Amino acid sequence: MLEIQHLTRSFGGIKAVDDCSFSAVQGKITALIGPNGAGKTTVFNCISGIERMEKGNILYEHQDVSHWRDYERAEAGIARTFQLLRIFKNCTVYENVALAVHDRDQHLIPSFFGFNRLKEEDEKKIADVLTRVKLYDMEDTVASELSYGQQKLLSLARALLQPHRLLMLDEPVAGVNPVLRQDFVMLFKNLRDEGETIFLIEHDMEFVMEIADHVIVMNEGKVLKQGTPAEVRNDPRVLEVYLGK
């Protein structure tokens, strides 16, 4: 689904991402982990087109999208969430997700202000996704009134409703309480079983080890280790990065 070849990105002479190569397999959950400042979010930003890389190639479904604009990658089926929530906090849950259904900007304003009705099939998609993330009975709730964990679920619901084939999630359970975190575990496992391809960044190692099929460890802009959760967890270099010598 996704292949990264020798990705490099610098800021002021400092290499935030240094010659990184890895892949994310279709229908699997791939986790990108590492300490703060390792370059994980920069990798995400380069893949989604928010930041331009200096060197390397990004292959998505065997197409080189390295020079595509961010909206072109989104239209091709790359959906993502952000570490800092980007939801419309003054809008209701329903209004937030209704904006994600359409893949063309000309539908944005009419849908937002209620100038036209969504299609029945779109209403069903919204109902199904809100049910999955346990927000169905809160569709008239203003987003700012949700708990932080529920706002994370709302952000995920929007990504799920965007027409996509690759789901990129930046720290989906950061700051989420343990009970809600378990809901995320079950949700991601179910999505994978249904064929979703998920590529995520996460600091919660217990969460990563529970759901990931493949783990990529970054440190100081480089890929330090790749493998199964068990292989990564038992690697001395990974333990040193997280726990010290």
Image (tube, rainbow, N blue to C red):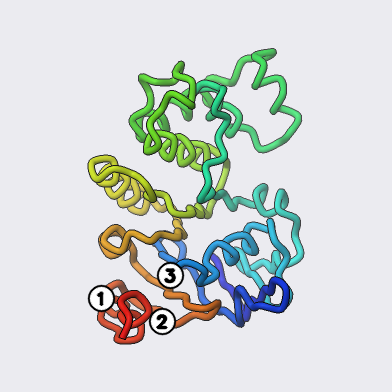
Residue at image position (47%, 77%) is 219
C-alpha gap between disc 2 and disc 1: 12 Å
Residue 238, x across and y down, in percent: 35, 80
User: Which SS class for mark 3?
Assistant: loop
Callout count:
3
Report the quarter where the C terminus lies: bottom left
Quarter holding residue 153: top left
- Residue drawn where x is 61% and y is 82% of the image: 19
Give the number of the disc on residue 35.
3
In the depicted structure, whether residue 113 falls above or below residue 159: above
Image location (x, y in percent) of residue 240: 33, 82
Residue 26 horizontal side relative to residue 41, left or right: left
What is the distance, in whole Å, between disc 3 and disc 1 at their CAs? 19 Å
Q: Does 18 appear above or below 128?
A: below
Badge 2 is on which residue?
A: 225
Determine whether the residue tagged by mark 2 lies in a helix, strand or loop: strand
* Three-letter amino acid code of the residue under disc 1: Ala
Pointer 3 or 1: first along the chain: 3
> What residue did someone put label 1 on?
230
Q: Which badge, 2 or 3, comes first in the chain's sequence?
A: 3
**Picture coordinates of residue 181, whole percent (x, y):** 29, 46
**Residue toward you, 170 or 72:** 170
Tell me which amino acid carries mark 3. Answer: Pro
Q: Residues within 10 Å of mark 1 (few under 14, many from 20)?
A: few
Residue 229 horizontal/vertical position (percent)? 30, 72
Q: Residue at x 53, y 20 (%)?
A: 120
